[in-house]
Amino acid sequence: MKRFIKIIIVWICIFTLGLNNVYAKSIKLNVSNKVIYKNSSFTLKVKNTKKKASVTYPRKSLKVKRLSKRSFKVTGISKGTYSVKVKVGKKRSTCKVTVNEWVSLKIIGVGKTMFDRKVTYSDGTTGYSVLKKTGYSLKVNGFGKYIYVRSINGLKEKAYGPRSGWMYSVNGVYPNKSAGAYKLSSGDKVVWKYVNYK
């Protein structure tokens, strides 16, 4: 029994030393996993040291600018998931950065902007599918390439006159096709606006 207890104590010591070793080789970051949009940035900071940190990263995919001894501005250049490796002496840590492409979406109701921010873009995103990403309640006629939006978040067509309703534009131009048929490109600016033609 005593021999068994000694073996257990030895294993606990080995395990504890192992944990201390792992801790000694790591450093703390303010963020270890970050999702950003292409051409947007965040600040990466080393928390548990006063020494100067260095970083390695894929230069074709990310841009990293030093702000101080222990902080960096990280900017996404191309879509994908990448690692920013941080080193202080022999201690290391990694921040995983996911860069998404985006489109800008604005929804303008009657006298107010209902929605105005970037949303994630992927191949095949349309003027209608990007609208669905808001989570707003939508009422439509038709389907697929022939969809027509009648109501967004309770604001219905003809509520302010017989010729009032929703129209969409892309980069300032009103397309001559259904929002379900119009395929967007990364970086497009989409505006859904409630109009009232008298």
Image (cartoon, helix red, strand yellow):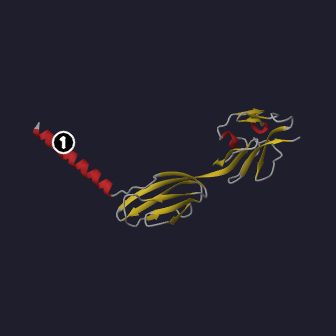
Instruction: Find residue 179 and report its horizontal and vertical position in percent.
Output: 76, 42
Which residue occupies the foreground of this view, 72 or 112? 112
Q: Residue at x 86, y 34 (%)?
A: 162
50 with respect to 184 (left or right): left
Q: Is residue 66 above or below residue 38?
A: below
User: Mark 1: which secondary structure?
Assistant: helix
Instruction: Find residue 57 and report its horizontal and vertical position in percent.
Output: 49, 62
Q: Residues within 10 Å of mark 1 (few under 14, many from 20)?
A: few
Q: Residue 106, can we see it?
A: yes
Q: Is residue 72 above or below residue 125?
A: below
Instruction: Find residue 61 and report its horizontal and vertical position in percent.
Output: 56, 60
86 with respect to 35 (left or right): left
Outermost residue on the front side: it is: 111
Residue on which disc 1 sits: 8
82 with respect to 27 (left or right): right
- Tag 1: amino acid: Ile
